[in-house]
Structure formats: C-alpha cells, structure tokens
Image: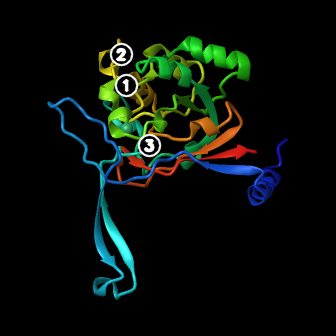
C-alpha cells in the first residue's frame, strides 16, 4: 500500500535537491503570440494586448506597476474545456471553473512524431503510432495526458508556426481509441490548436474537439519543450484560470520530470 505522505515528502526532497526537475511547457504570451486564423465566414479570436494601469507613476503612487490584459480564451499555451465544443456542452462540471481539480494533474505519455512532422507538415497521429509506442513503453494508463511531440514549438516565426493551416494532429480513429480503449484525461499538442490544420475535412471534422470534448475530456494547445520530457514518467500539471463558464484559458503548464 502506497504511503501518500511519504510520496509527498519524497517529492519535496526531490524538488529541493533538483532530482525532480520542473519543466515549463508554456510559451510566453505577448502581442506577437500567434492566434488561430479561421476562414473569413467565422469570427476571429483577438491576440494578446496589454494596457498599462500604472507604471511606477503618479497613477500608481509612483510605486506600483500593473496592466490590463485582453485576449481570446484560446490564446498561446491554453486549455480546452469540454464546454468549448457543442459535443461537450451538456456535461456537468465541464468548464474551467467547475472541472474537478483532481483531473488537472496526471501522468504524461509523450509520443514523438517530430521526424514525421519534419517530413510532412500534415502528418497525423494514428492508432498504429500509439500501438508501436506502447510496445516500447507499456500501455497508456487511464487518466494520462497523451502529448503529441512534433517540435512545432521550435517554429518561432508566426508564419511558420501557423503554416497556412498545414499542421500535424491526430486522426479520428486514434481519438476514438484513446477515449474508448485507454480512457485518457486529455490530448496535448505543440500546434495552435489540438486538431490538425486540415481537420475540417476529416471523416469526423475536428476529431480532437468533436470526440475528446464529446467524451468530457480535455485539450492542451501550443505546448513547448516536449523534447525535454521522457516518453513516460513525468507528471503534468495543467490548471486553467478559474473563469466563470470558461471554454478554456491560457495557463502555465509544467511537468515534474525525474532527472
Ligand atoms: Mn483551443
């Protein structure tokens, strides 16, 4: 039987000594942060803007600095809640303020598709990819965060990052598999959204959004530093802002990694 108090005590020692490393999986939010571009018939999400409230000037008693922030809920490294999609809108506790926090921390399984993505920007994660990964690393546990590594976050220019909607993502069969056969907590990617750039035309359009949220599960987009994670063994912490009825939110995603 696991001694939970001992586990947390060991964790504290690991953090203090650096034998457990905290890896930042987030990008910086700024006016330059790329935002998904939708076809003209749809409303667009605004990028980030900062407006000063005071900056050590008389408006702030010559002492304090703070700003007002404005951005869409799905900007930069961000969390997708089930309520984001029509298929997930009727679940209880499906928004950023009502999700059970127990669900926001879990093991990370990192599937490396970076070589395929370098060769083909429209590369898709498939069931075969997952089975090949499992043959090497063991079965994906229930409640895991499955992260698709593509090294896409290394594309620092917005035009290369958005790539005219030719970006990698999951196919619909792998989404069905990870939901029904593995009961994962959510799916994370390095690209601007959890679905592939061409996913509007898939047999299930936008399968991560349609199927994952339809199963009351989560998404994480615009992750970085997935190349610093082991295939298994890291713990992911992904807690969105507690926005009332939030469809998602920017967040700081960190991973606890054994060194
Ligand atoms: Mn999103």
In this picture, residue 117 sits left or right of residue 35: right
Q: Residue at x 24, y 32 (%)?
A: 38
The dot on residue 229 is none
Query: Which residue is tagged 3?
Result: 79
Spatial separation of the CA atoms under disc 3 and disc 1: 15 Å
Q: Are marks 2 and 3 in contact (CB under 8 Å)?
A: no
The dot on residue 210 is 1
Q: Residue at x 40, y 53 (%)?
A: 29
Foreground of the two, 201 or 157: 157
Whether the residue carrying mark 3 lies under 8 Å from ligand 1 is answered with: yes
Spatial separation of the CA atoms under disc 2 and disc 1: 8 Å
Disc nearest the viewer among 3 and 1? 3
Of the numbered discs 2 and 3, the one sitting upstream in the chain is 3
Q: Residue at x 32, y 26 (%)?
A: 165
Q: Are marks 2 and 1 in contact (CB under 8 Å)?
A: yes
- The answer to whether any part of residue 89 appears in the image is no
At which x and y percent is residue 130?
A: 60, 18
At which x and y percent is residue 138?
A: 72, 22
**Vertical position of residue 96 compared to residue 13: above or below:** above
At mark 3, the secondary structure is strand
Spatial separation of the CA atoms under disc 2 and disc 3: 22 Å
**Vertical position of residue 114 compared to residue 106: above or below:** above
Neighbour tally class for label 2: few under 14, some 14-19, many 20 plus, Cα within 10 Å: some
Of the numbered discs 3 and 1, the one sitting upstream in the chain is 3
In this picture, residue 223 sits left or right of residue 14: left
At mark 2, the secondary structure is loop
Residue 232 sits in quarter:
top right
At which x and y percent is residue 247?
A: 35, 43
């Amino acid at each position: 039987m696991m001694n939970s108090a001992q586990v947390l005590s060991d964790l504290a020692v690991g953090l203090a000594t650096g034998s457990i490393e905290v890896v930042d999986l987030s990008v910086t939010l700024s006016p330059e942060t790329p935002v998904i571009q939708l076809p003209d018939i749809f409303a667009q999400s605004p990028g980030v803007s900062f407006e000063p409230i005071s900056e050590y000037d008389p408006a702030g008693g010559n002492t304090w600095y703070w700003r007002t922030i404005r951005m869409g809920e799905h900007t930069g490294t961000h969390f997708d809640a089930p309520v984001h999609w029509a298929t997930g809108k009727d679940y209880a506790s499906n928004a950023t303020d009502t999700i059970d926090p127990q669900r926001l921390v879990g093991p990370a399984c990192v599937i490396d598709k970076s070589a395929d993505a370098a060769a083909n920007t429209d590369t898709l994660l498939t069931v075969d990819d997952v089975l090949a990964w499992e043959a090497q690393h063991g079965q994906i546990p229930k409640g895991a965060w499955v992260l698709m590594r593509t090294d896409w976050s290394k594309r620092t220019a917005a035009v290369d990052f958005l790539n005219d909607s030719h970006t990698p993502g999951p196919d619909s069969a792998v989404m069905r598999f990870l939901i029904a056969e593995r009961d994962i907590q959510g799916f994370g990617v390095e690209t601007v959204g959890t679905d592939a750039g061409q996913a509007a035309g898939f047999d299930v359009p936008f399968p991560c959004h349609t199927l994952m949220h339809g199963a009351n599960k989560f998404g994480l987009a615009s992750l970085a530093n997935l190349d610093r994670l082991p295939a298994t063994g890291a713990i992911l912490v992904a807690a969105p802002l507690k926005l009332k009825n939030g469809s998602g939110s920017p967040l700081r995603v960190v991973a606890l990694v054994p060194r």
